[in-house]
Image (cartoon, rainbow, N blue to C red):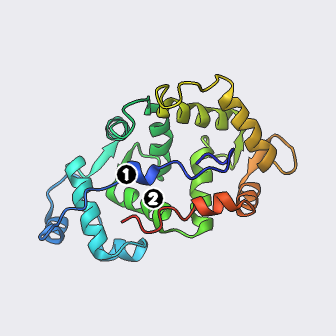
């Protein structure tokens, strides 16, 4: 999410798009799967997320096709994510995104982790989405975003989009985005952006609010 220019949210949802194939026996397969990690039941995940049982079936089939073991580690996550950005280097942004999905910080993302994060991105409330975005940007999880953290995020986004997408992009552009971000978000000018400052600033920006609703009904 590049809030520096109030542009739409970076397309995590698009990069996670699942093949919407017809699955007749996926529920049985979900319950009886012999993969290394056995996911929670569909009913429980339906209660915990904003997806229907049928949507969870489709998502599980797509996840299992990519990750037969039932979990994905960071290297596999990077490989999958790179398919959506062949013109650039998405490895660093994928690293940050992986850490946002890996909420228990055990070095792997399970199906439960995946659908929980996706539920927030696609179906969460405005506050839910803003909290998720803040967590993505708060790289060391200390409760605030520094200019160094935001610079790392911006560089990773520019690397991911690739020089062929933006051939005339100036080297100083990421730093300018960071400065714009802090000018808008750092309301007390103490050099860091807190979750309260982040949410308050975003809620007052119409472009950001529109971007929050882009993927509400993707699946």
Q: Which residue is mark 2?
A: 117
Query: In x, y percent, where is residue 104?
Result: 46, 52
Q: What kind of element bears circle 2?
A: helix
Q: Is residue 13 above or below residue 120?
A: above
Task: Say few, some or many: other residues with alpha carbon within 10 Å of mark 2 (under 14 / 14 to 19 / 20 or more).
Answer: many
Residue 56 point in image, percent of width and height: 30, 68
Counting from the top left corner in percent of width and height, residue 145 is at 70, 44
For mark 1, what is the residue?
16
In front of the other: 12 or 97 = 12
The outermost residue toward the front is 168
In the structure shown, which secondary structural element does the residue marked by tag 1 occupy?
A: loop
**Residue 6, above or below 212:** above
The answer to whether residue 102 is seen in the rendering is no
User: Which of the pair 204/133 is nearer the observer?
Assistant: 204
Quadrant of the rendering where the C terminus is positioned: bottom left
**Up/down of 36 relative to 200, above or below:** above
Checking the image for residue 133, the label placed there is none
Is any atom of residue 131 visible in this view?
yes
Label 1 or label 2, whichever comes before in sequence order = 1
What residue sits 65% from the left and 36% below the top?
149
Cα–Cα span, label 1 and label 2: 11 Å
Describe residue 127's horizontal placement relative to residue 100 as left or right.
right
């Amino acid at each position: 999410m590049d809030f520096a220019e109030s542009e739409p949210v970076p397309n995590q949802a698009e990069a996670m798009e699942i093949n919407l194939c017809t699955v007749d026996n996926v529920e049985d397969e979900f319950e009886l799967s012999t993969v290394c990690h056995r996911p929670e039941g569909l009913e429980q995940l339906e209660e915990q997320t904003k997806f229907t049982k049928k949507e969870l079936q489709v998502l599980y089939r797509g996840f299992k096709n990519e990750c037969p073991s039932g979990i994905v580690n960071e290297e596999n996550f990077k490989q999958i994510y790179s398919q959506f950005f062949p013109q650039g280097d998405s490895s660093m942004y994928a690293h940050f995104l992986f850490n946002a999905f890996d909420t228990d910080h055990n070095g792997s993302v399970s199906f439960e982790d995946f659908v929980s994060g996706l539920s927030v991105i696609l179906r969460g409330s405005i506050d839910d989405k803003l909290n998720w975005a803040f967590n993505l940007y708060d790289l060391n999880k200390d409760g605030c975003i520094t200019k160094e953290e935001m610079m790392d995020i911006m560089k990773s986004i520019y690397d991911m989009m690739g020089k062929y997408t933006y051939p005339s992009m100036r080297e100083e552009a990421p730093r300018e985005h960071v400065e714009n971000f802090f000018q808008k978000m750092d309301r007390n000018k103490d050099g860091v952006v807190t979750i309260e400052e982040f949410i308050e600033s975003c809620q007052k920006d119409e472009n950001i609010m529109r971007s929050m609703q882009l993927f509400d009904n993707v699946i």
